[in-house]
């Protein structure tokens, strides 16, 4: 068993970040001001219509839909780390589980707002619920996103219950309302055997339940593309292709969050080089799977070389989109895979840089999935202005696209300041189990 002194130190270390600091207020002020600028851009879009964007009759999906696919993708990381790794008995992922769950919840919750931004008349969203048809992939998309947000919330909250009780008892200088709120949310936790079993069983059920939901959320999103016959989207592999890509962007997001939490919250004893090495190996694995699907996406149509697909691939490989395409593939996937094969590149510093390139590449990957296809319809574009043929995002569109990213950062920052970012109860239990095994 761990000594009481050791338990107190762990508790103190992991509760220390839950306090207001000057750097936190400055960071939140910067995010808040940036969000206001982006919301003003959205106000202009609401006032003047979609004409303020670069979208039109031909390229009707652009940065907004790319953003939506990216957000849905990144939200799957909670399922991978907290469910799949947990069910497979990977104890090393315990300190990273809550970070992954917070990222998953933030991205999933904001994904719904992202799709609303693409609507010229957002008030008509209610028509999806009132007049939606079960055959429509959009109805299923809204359904699975909503369910995934609810299940992700439970998946974050239920294992958090013991830590909420610790917060109510151990946090200093808490206002009475905050202490009472922690106590209320802890649901009268007393650390009894029955309560431990209930938490463990509930978490396991949710872990099993969230896997098909998470797979469904991105598979349905892929159907929005694959159910059309456009060159570049007409593919039967889009489901697993999107899911594997989701794990790549999610792992990269977790690595970046790990680095900043470790440095800013002084958690070097709990997020170590061992954890960076393990998550780096996981990123290499999912990136290799994603590389396979990337090869399949282009080699198969390239071999058949139908007329429409030939034009689409030519634009990607050597045409107007070639620079963006090859930069994304090389800097965001192939080179990171090669670097991750070396252990020294899986340390915190190098891994942060690799993860940043992977995450940025993941966004641009969604971007080149969306708009080049829409620029190459089967019927020729004739007798229209040049700006109808070529998609160029406007400043308003870029700012509106950035708004959800800022909102995700705000959610992650606030959650990391009101709950322990590393599970206290699970960390203590795991260390006690290790001590028992040594005897």
Image (cartoon, grey):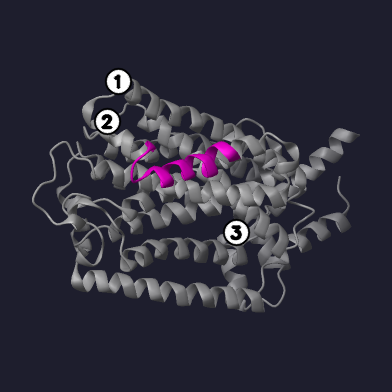
Q: Position of residue 184 (x, y in %)?
A: 56, 64
Q: Quadrant of residue 196?
A: top right
Q: Quadrant of residue 276?
A: top right
Q: Position of residue 51 (x, y in %)?
A: 19, 65
Q: CA distance from mark 1 to mark 3?
A: 60 Å
323 lies left or right of 3: left
Q: CA distance from mark 2 to mark 1?
A: 9 Å
Closest to the observer, 5 or 289:
289
| Element carrying mark 3 | loop
Taking the spot 65% from the left edge, 41% from the top edge, the residue there is 279
Residue 77: tell me if it is visible.
no
Mark 2 = which residue?
309
The residue at the far front in this view is 318
The question of residue 28 being in magenta is answered with no
Closest to the observer, 404 or 400:
400
Residue 377, relative to residue 419: is it above or below? above
Taking the spot 47% from the left edge, 44% from the top edge, the residue there is 328
Taking the spot 37% from the left edge, 48% from the top edge, the residue there is 367
| Element carrying mark 1 | helix
Q: CB atoms at circles 2 and 1 under 8 Å apart?
A: yes
Q: Which mark is residue 342?
A: none
Q: Which mark is residue 186?
A: 3
Of callouts 3 and 2, the N-terminal one: 3
Q: Position of residue 422 (x, y in %)?
A: 68, 54
User: Which quadrant, please, contains the C terminus?
Assistant: top right
Q: Residues within 10 Å of mark 1 (few under 14, many from 20)?
A: few
Q: CB atoms at circles 1 and 3 under 8 Å apart?
A: no
User: Which quadrant, please, contains the N terminus?
Assistant: top right
What is the magenta segment's predominant secondary structure? helix
Mark 1 = which residue?
304
Which segment is the magenta one?
317-335
The question of residue 334 being in magenta is answered with yes
């Amino acid at each position: 068993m761990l000594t009481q002194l050791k338990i107190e130190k762990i508790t103190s270390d992991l509760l220390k970040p839950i306090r207001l600091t000057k750097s936190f207020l400055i960071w939140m002020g910067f995010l808040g001001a940036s969000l206001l600028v982006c919301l003003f851009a959205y106000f202009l879009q609401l006032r003047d219509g979609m004409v303020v964007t670069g979208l039109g009759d031909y390229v009707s999906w652009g940065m907004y839909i790319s953003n939506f696919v990216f957000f849905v993708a990144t939200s799957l990381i909670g399922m991978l780390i907290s469910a799949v790794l947990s069910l497979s008995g990977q104890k090393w992922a315990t300190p990273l589980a809550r970070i992954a769950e917070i990222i998953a919840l933030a991205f999933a919750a904001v994904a719904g707002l992202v799709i609303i931004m693409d609507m010229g008349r957002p008030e008509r969203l209610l028509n999806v619920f009132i007049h939606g048809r079960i055959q429509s992939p959009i109805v299923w998309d809204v359904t699975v996103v909503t369910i995934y947000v609810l299940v992700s919330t439970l998946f974050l909250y239920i294992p958090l219950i013991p830590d909420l009780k610790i917060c109510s008892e151990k946090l200093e200088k808490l206002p009475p309302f905050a202490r009472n709120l922690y106590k209320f949310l802890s649901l009268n936790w007393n650390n009894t055997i029955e309560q431990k079993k209930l938490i463990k069983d509930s978490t396991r059920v949710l872990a099993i339940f969230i896997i098909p939901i998470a797979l469904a959320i991105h598979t349905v999103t892929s159907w929005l593309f694959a159910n059309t016959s456009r060159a570049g989207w007409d593919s039967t592999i889009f489901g697993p292709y999107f899911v594997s890509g989701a794990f790549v962007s999610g792992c990269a997001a977790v690595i970046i969050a790990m680095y900043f939490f470790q440095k800013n919250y002084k958690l070097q004893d709990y997020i170590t080089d061992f954890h960076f090495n393990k998550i780096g190996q996981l990123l290499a694995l999912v990136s290799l799977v994603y590389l396979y699907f990337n090869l399949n996406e282009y080699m198969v149509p390239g071999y058949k070389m139908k007329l429409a697909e030939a034009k689409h691939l030519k634009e990607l490989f050597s045409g107007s989109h070639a620079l963006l395409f090859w930069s994304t593939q090389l800097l965001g996937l192939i080179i990171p895979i090669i670097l991750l094969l070396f252990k020294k590149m899986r340390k915190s510093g190098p891994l942060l840089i690799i993860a940043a390139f992977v995450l940025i590449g993941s966004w641009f990957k969604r971007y080149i999935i969306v708009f080049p296809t829409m620029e190459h319809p089967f019927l020729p574009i004739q007798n229209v202005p040049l700006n109808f043929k070529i998609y160029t995002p406007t400043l308003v569109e870029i700012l509106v696209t950035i708004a959800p990213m800022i909102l995700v950062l705000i959610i992650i920052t606030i959650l990391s300041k009101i709950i322990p970012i590393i599970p206290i109860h699970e960390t203590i239990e795991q260390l006690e189990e290790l001590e028992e095994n040594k005897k």
